[in-house]
Amino acid sequence: MGGGYGAAVTGRDEVMAALHASSGRFIDLVASLDPEHGARPVPGLVWNVGETVAHVLTVVRRGYADRRRSPTASATAGLNQQVLDETPDRDLPVLVALLREDVHTALDVVFPKIPEDRTFDFHGGMRTTMTPALRIVLGEFVVHGYDVASAVDRPWTITDEEARLLVPTDLLSGWVRPDAAEASYELRLGDATPVRLDVGPGRLSVAEGTGGTPITIEPSAFVLAFYGRRIPPDSDALIGLLSNFIPS
């Protein structure tokens, strides 16, 4: 896996630039917090702020050092909790230092050496190439940045560019329910080119184009809805799309 919308439309340099920017904003946010903020509960999650930041650290490490992957979509949450339990650090200044070091290692040292045509195992029993996988890592910084900011009542912006890069790709076929009905959706995010999502049992195909049930929504609102944070009211088409995916 690794073709489709993620590879054909989005360049790797573009995703890497967004990753540098979003990881920097995430680390700066955490660095600005008081130590006691680590115990704040995160709305909608079972983790507090310290645990959420530690989870992001484990995701970075799984990008370049820890090769464990979930065999199925439903096993992903369990693996996430396992590696979090194995990571004892919850002190925010310590986590900031670890993040700065590990993000630098991942983004500046390891990832640039991996060729785009190399395929490798991903979570959910999928295989992929770099660009689609990097977009998933981008989502960790963008969405968990929102989580941490919400917990401590700080502002957090999801840019239109980040939102466009977080449109799901074929890689998320592993998260589509095996009993999903055949359906097509036309995603309209602001003034971006429409994207068509074709869903079927255990299958997702994404490409620029029109056709299917229209979903017109602000880019940042789509990201929050797709990641289960905030679903706008009166959005039957969006709810229909989201119902096809296995939570993880």
Image (tube, rainbow, N blue to C red):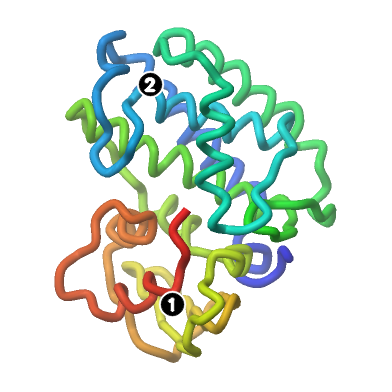
Any mark on residue 49, and which? Answer: none
At mark 2, the secondary structure is helix
Residue shown at the point (60%, 69%) measured from the top left: 173
Of the numbered discs 2 and 1, the one sitting upstream in the chain is 2
Residue shown at the point (74%, 29%) measured from the top left: 65
Q: Amino acid at mark 1?
A: Pro
72 sits to left or right of 19: right
58 sits to left or right of 157: right
Query: How many discs mark residues in the rendered view?
Result: 2
- The quadrant where residue 227 appears: bottom left
Residue shown at the point (67%, 68%) measured from the top left: 8
Q: Residue tagged by mark 2?
A: 50
- The quadrant where residue 178 appears: bottom right
94 sits to left or right of 156: right
Q: Residue tagged by mark 1?
A: 194
Between 220 and 102, the one lying in front of the other is 102
Callouts 2 and 1 close, C-beta under 8 Å = no
Residue shown at the point (53%, 43%) measured from the top left: 78
Q: Position of residue 134 (x, y in %)?
A: 62, 47
For label 1, count other residues whose C-alpha is less than 10 Å away and answer few (under 14), some (14-19) or many (20+): many
Q: Position of residue 244 (x, y in %)?
A: 44, 74
- Asked if residue 201 is positioned above or below residue 149 in the image, the reply reads below
- Asked if residue 200 is positioned above or below residue 160 in the image, the reply reads below
Q: Amino acid at mark 2?
A: Gly
For label 2, count other residues whose C-alpha is less than 10 Å away and answer few (under 14), some (14-19) or many (20+): many
